[in-house]
Amino acid sequence: MAGVGVRNGNVYRAAWIGVLLASCGTGSPPGPRIDFSDYGTSPDDAGEGRSGEGGATADCEGCPGPDGGGDSLVAPDGDAAGGPDLDAATDPGSPDTVEPDTGPCTAGTIFCYESSRAQCNADGDDFVVLEECLDDNPCTLDQCVNGMCVFPPSGDKSCCEPPCPLGQLCVNSECICAPKCFGKECGDDGCGGSCGECGEGFSCSPKGTCECVPVCEGKQCGDDGCGGECGYCVPPATCQPDGQCACIPNCAGKQCGEDGCGGSCGQCPPLHQCQPDGSCVYSCPVCPQLEGCAAIPFGGHVYYFCNPSKKWGEARDWCSERGTHLATVSSWAEQGFLAANLGGTAMWIGLHQEWYTWEWSWVNGEPVSFTAWGDGQPDDGDFWTEEDCVELFAWGPWNDNDCGSKSRYICEFEPKG
């Protein structure tokens, strides 16, 4: 027998095949009649179901299926059913048609079909779906029990009802604050907790990232510990290991010239010039060049240590003719300088004794304010010798000697201005 089933506007055509309808008792009426006007069907509509709204649950004994409280509708294979069980296979000629396995149901009976409420038509050979049990609530189960839609909790502990508001999470069926830590390493999570802590030397930025903390306290320059600089020094100052800017004079191996910090490594003595390498070199453009003599400056004067041996008077005249004079000595510093350059031999200097006064005097007329006589000197020689001229012993002290003796001599030049 063919019939039409309507489920929320979809028409199902089915053939009921060999189904036994168990009743509450032999010959018992199939149950109270129901006004099908509420469901869009009537007893006169045999063979064709109509979709409808609403409807009441049939209260009868012997209603088909477990929902009616009587015997179950039994399929040919012996399976119990709470109502007609539609086969999922569809008729190729009609996409909405299914073939149920159950037989006729009691007219007007309301039962559960899958998760929907359904009702048999007036002839008991077809049914219509009255209502799908759907509440669109993910926290409940959509079920039909005894012809009624029920919605028991799903039992999912992570499900909250009502749903949690924006900014909260459902945990163990409770709405809790959702931490806001996406893309953050540290800082407040918005729920009274933290998204993480930064390690030593790092601090949490307003964006929630751990950033290196520059260490520049008390420093003018140098590394800040984060790949940057604490500052830069203005040349010629350079950054020192303690983070301070300072200029360190560089005078290693230099006698003169700039120290690299605006100062000087020293000044050359008179008659010397400072060279680019910081050395002082003798230079006296106005000083005479005396052949056979070594010129050595000292104290602003130039001393010529001459090799040819001459008598004292010859040496005096030779020096004078060349713009110099036999050397005079006025201090221990000058005496030490001359003694250090004698070269292991005695040399005449410009001190002599006037024959008419028997007093010692210098050839250039300056007063005799300093002497460096050797032990027992001057001794004026013996009875037959007049020692009226002075020489430096090879080791430095003065000695009066015969002016006619020949010795090496020292000329002195005094640059003017």
Image (spheres, rainbow, N blue to C red):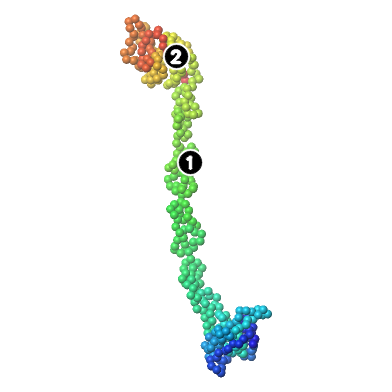
Tag 1: residue type? Cys
From this view, report whether residue 113 is shown above or below residue 325. Answer: below
Q: Secondary structure at mark 1?
A: loop
Between disc 2 and disc 1, whose residue precedes?
1
From this view, report whether residue 62 is shown above or below residue 342. Answer: below
Q: Is residue 291 visible?
A: yes
Q: Is residue 120 visible?
A: no
Task: In the displayed orientation, state which residue is furthest to the left.
Answer: 376
Q: Nearer the viewer, residue 225 or 68?
A: 68
Residue drawn where x is 45% and y is 19% of the image: 296
Tag 2: residue type? Asn
Mark 2 or mark 1: which is in front? 2
The x and y percentages for residue 280 are: 47, 25
The residue beneath circle 2 is 307
* Left or right of residue 146: residue 50: right
* Left or right of residue 19: residue 359: left
Residue drawn where x is 48% and y is 75% of the image: 155
Q: Quadrant of residue 342?
A: top left
Crowding at label 1, few (<14), some or many (≥20) Cα neighbours within 10 Å? Answer: some
From this view, report whether residue 163 is shown above or below residue 84. Answer: above
Task: In the displayed orientation, state which residue is furthest to the top.
Answer: 384
From this view, report whether residue 228 is shown above or below residue 177. Answer: above
The residue beneath circle 1 is 233
Q: Quadrant of the N terminus?
A: bottom right
